Image (spheres, rainbow, N blue to C red):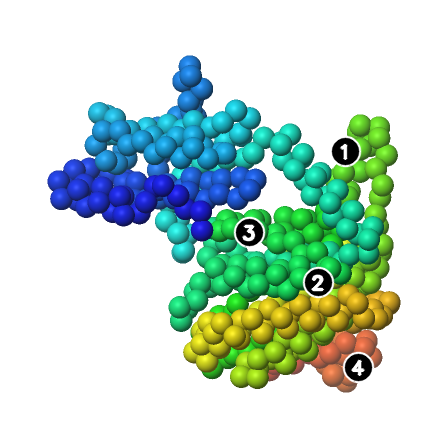
Amino acid sequence: MQKTIITRAALVLVFALICLTGLFAEEARITDIRFWQSPEEAQVVLDISAPPRVSDVSMLRDGTLYFDISECAFRPGRQRYPLQNPFLEVLTVQQNDDRSARVFFRVPQGVEAKTFVLAKNDRKGDRIVIFLREPQATLMQKRNAELFEVNRLKAGNVKIVVIDPGHGGEDPGTRHNGIIEKNYVMTMGKLIKAYFDRDPRFKAILTRDGDYIIPLERRREIAERLGADAFISLHVNYNSKKVIRGIEVYYESPKGAVGEAERLVAETENQVDFAGAMNNAAPIITKREIIEKQAITMNKSRQLAEKVEAQLGASVVELPSRGVKRAGFKVLHSMAMPSVLVEFGYVSNLSDAEILKNYTARTRLAQGLYFGVRDFLLGHIEEGYDTGYLDFIKTAAAERARKAALRKTQAAAKTSGKGKNRTYKVKSGDTLSGIAAKHGVTTAAIAKANKLSSKQVIKAGQTLVIPAK
Ligand SMILES: [Zn+2]
């Protein structure tokens, strides 16, 4: 947790004062200011009691940035929060006479700052976010150094395992029975990493090592960039049915993979269009190639999931396993390395929650996960395809073809039938059913085409419309 300096306690006092004096009762209020920091970026989040109207960001001559929030109350006067960290030197909030609040912030040279408003949703209220990012040059330098070290280890046949503690920062994940997911999986991630780091055959890397959020696709991109041999995302589960309990290990589902293949094809096409315009040929990857790559990776992911599930399931006697499952989670879409997502248990279930909180059980789960990944990476990995996925693709293609053919026949029937209504002059002794049979249509169809009621009798000499078949 790197929520620093601006303490909630101080702010609570501030708002107590505002409430007591009854000032600004009608206006929006800044109800909290929070600060989140990762190694590469930081966020200042201002919680606002109503949708805020925010001006553009301007700059003072000394480089200080600022923006105004109109009709917004904060503490009278000027509050200064010296942060002095790599992203933010100081944050100042000033209550203006015109009932607006002005937010000043000064960032170290090179730090990129972006301000935006987040509308309230079912979990969070209205917010103003100041997003700060490390200078690109420093970032690249750091990343290259990390990659260099990983490549050196890989040359010595060390296996790279990327562990992804889910959620973080503004996204706490699920919370119940005294467990907050983002914190729990962070603790587990560090425990698991410790097991790998004690074994010279492995190097474990965490996607996050503090309380901050990382976009889902970036989590697997971190692993891909490092050429990881395995990717494991850590979570705990929740269900409103409190009896549901146990461990689950997921790997990519056929449906999730197809969606990703389609997204990649669309992306490639856009790039090709762009490259064409730039007269610069880009490598083209076809949908078939993507599916083949996915099927190879998913076959490995299944083996990883099975090994991990076997060890996790055996690690704590009291904690049952619900087995290996498949789902199209975004973090599992990689074609570059086998990926699994582990749900350690249901925090909504009291027994699971008690076990998950127990130190010995946690250690055993961490060790079990390490054993499972080790069994997979050092054991025999079967080459081949995820045949279930290829069958799914085939079935889907056949179904599409069947539907297309059906549409074609229907369309053809419609056109060939058009304007081909014939007429028939009723002869003496004819019956409606006889005429219908002769023309291969139903009695009802003739009745309908000629607007005949059920009791009406046809007469000789009458002309009937015979509808097309
Ligand atoms: Zn989760």
Between the residue at mark 1 and the residue at mark 3, the CA separation in whole angstroms equals 38 Å
Between the residue at mark 3 and the residue at mark 2, the CA separation in whole angstroms equals 20 Å
Residue displayed at 27% across by 43% down: 11
Judging by the rendered image, the residue that carries numbered circle 1 is 274
Residue displayed at 55% across by 42% down: 39
Secondary structure under badge 3?
A: loop
**Of 440 and 111, which appears nearest the observer?**
111
Foreground mark, 1 or 3, reads: 3
Evaluate whether residue 170 shows in this view. Answer: no
The amino acid beneath tag 2 is: Asp
**Of 49 and 213, which appears nearest the observer?**
213
Q: Is residue 126 left or right of residue 454?
A: left
Evaluate whether residue 296 shows in this view. Answer: yes
The amino acid beneath tag 1 is: Phe
Secondary structure under badge 4?
A: helix
Q: Earlier in the sequence, mark 1 or mark 3?
A: 3
Secondary structure under badge 1?
A: helix
Labels 3 and 4 touching (C-beta < 8 A): no
Labels 3 and 2 touching (C-beta < 8 A): no
Judging by the rendered image, the residue that carries numbered circle 4 is 437
Foreground mark, 4 or 1, reads: 1
